[in-house]
Amino acid sequence: MFLADVIGTVVSPVQIPELEGQTLLLLRPVTPDGHATGRTRIGIDKAGAGEGDRVIVLDEGNGGRQILGDPRAAVKTVVLGVVDYVEENGKLQYDHRNSAKLAPLG
Amino acid sequence: MFLADVIGTVVSPVQIPELEGQTLLLLRPVTPDGHATGRTRIGIDKAGAGEGDRVIVLDEGNGGRQILGDPRAAVKTVVLGVVDYVEENGKLQYDHRNSAKLAPLG
Amino acid sequence: MFLADVIGTVVSPVQIPELEGQTLLLLRPVTPDGHATGRTRIGIDKAGAGEGDRVIVLDEGNGGRQILGDPRAAVKTVVLGVVDYVEENGKLQYDHRNSAKLAPLG
Amino acid sequence: MFLADVIGTVVSPVQIPELEGQTLLLLRPVTPDGHATGRTRIGIDKAGAGEGDRVIVLDEGNGGRQILGDPRAAVKTVVLGVVDYVEENGKLQYDHRNSAKLAPLG
Amino acid sequence: MFLADVIGTVVSPVQIPELEGQTLLLLRPVTPDGHATGRTRIGIDKAGAGEGDRVIVLDEGNGGRQILGDPRAAVKTVVLGVVDYVEENGKLQYDHRNSAKLAPLG
């Protein structure tokens, strides 16, 4: 499991019944203090997350299938929760209430 | 799951019944704005994807087997869908209608 | 399995029953002599670990579910134990009794 | 799944019944045009591959066990097939008939 | 599966029944000619390996559980065998009989 920022969305007519109607979030893995680290992933949202949120991501197929409630779902990456706080070495590195939400399109 | 561009194909007499007749696509992982990121993979096409398409890739064995409808298939990497749009920080990073298809061979 | 230092915690209202009440630890993978190596992870604590401890981490879903005693738990990363000693090439690289605990917040 | 070149062999008295009599191939992951990329792996040969061949590798335990026909086999990396052609962006990057076989020992 | 050198041990009161009494080896992944490559792992010894040995490592949970004979074991990384020879491009890169064992502690 790792931290990521929701940076956008992907639209695709995925031909998999379990993924129909699911929002596909663009997820950028980040360090505790918010620097990008590692490759962008695409994940299913199960936490009501939106652009600008910092989230906890599970990147494992069997767990993802359990969360979706479907043992046959073709899914690997799932957003488990929106983060309230990240504390590192006794220092508050992230506070959801102070996070700058990204400006919406247009 | 991650974004990738279909950059070519691989031809191999793979001696695995479940893979017979399947197209083996060369997949280059990309960032939301299209820069290459990470190692090229070989994937099975389940979305009618072709060279020049941006796609969503699932890289997990159990999910791949479900999509192929065969619990014994020796497969890990599957193309789930062709991408229509990628939106990042309120900006349209990829629009399938404007993507430059790569020129065919010859 | 790999070595990591516990460097902090993450607070998130994760909507997964199996994770309710679990402490989410920030884990920084380290080399035997304590240099950071690789991406920070978020793990469930099953060893009474706290900030400043060096720990053994299991990063595999099925094993994690066994430890939590729930075959349906959506979990991948689990802290298996606090490390007492790390010995490398005949040299003591880490001794838990001499490790400098990180100062608490405030 | 990924492309790799067979660059050698490993000899080891592995004490696992399912691996007895299997050839352990040294596999170097390569880009479509043949540059080394990523860490060398050890794989089981199920395709009659030899030194100098470019091959398709599956790196996933459950699929590997299916190919070996043994649901209990302790195996993760399996060579699925020898590659005939790799085509990238309309250009033939690899043709098995023209590949320079590595010189045998002695 | 990959090559690694055994470079030390880890001592930890891991509270997992299946791991009690098992030696936890520090494993440094290496290239065929012995250069370090990639992050150090912690593995269970099933091959009588010791410091200074080059070994074959399996890094996959289900296979690891089979080797330990316990379908519920929380384990991912297992040493399958001590390497006798590594041959690369027709050249002997490693010969166990000539390998310099690391000096013991003290």
Image (tube, coloured by chain):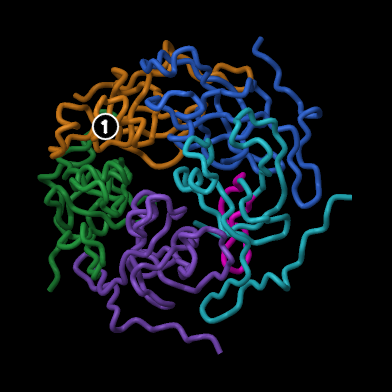
Chain colours: A green, B purple, C orange, D cyan, E blue
Locate the C terminus of chain B by quadrant: bottom right
Residues rendered magenta in the picture:
D27-43
Q: Position of residue B20 (x, y in %)?
A: 49, 65
In the displayed orientation, state which residue is furthest to the bottom. B106
Using a 10 Å C-alpha cutoff, classify the residue at mark 1 as few (fewer than 14 neighbours), some (14 to 19) or many (20 or more).
Answer: some
In this rendering, the count of numbered labels is 1
| Secondary element at image label 1 | loop
In the displayed orientation, state which residue is furthest to the right. D106
The answer to whether residue A83 is above or below residue C53 is: below
Majority secondary structure in the magenta region: loop
Foreground residue among E90 and D63: D63
Res. B25 visible in picture: no
- Residue at 63% x, 49% y is D45
- Residue C50 relative to residue B9: left or right: left
Which chain does tag 1 point to?
C
Q: Position of residue B58 (x, y in %)?
A: 36, 57
Q: Position of residue E40 (x, y in %)?
A: 53, 33
Q: Position of residue E26 (x, y in %)?
A: 55, 26
Res. D90 visible in picture: yes
Foreground residue among B28 and A103: B28
The answer to whether residue B100 is above or below residue C24 is: below
**For the residue marked with disc 1, what is the amino acid?**
Pro
Foreground residue among B100 and D19: D19
Q: Disc 1 designates what residue?
A: C71
- Residue at 43% x, 34% y is E61
Quarter of the image where one finds residue D80: bottom right
Foreground residue among E64 and E52: E64
The answer to whether residue E22 is above or below residue B46 is: above
Magenta-span inclusion, residue B58: no
Magenta-span inclusion, residue D28: yes
Quarter of the image where one finds residue D93: bottom right
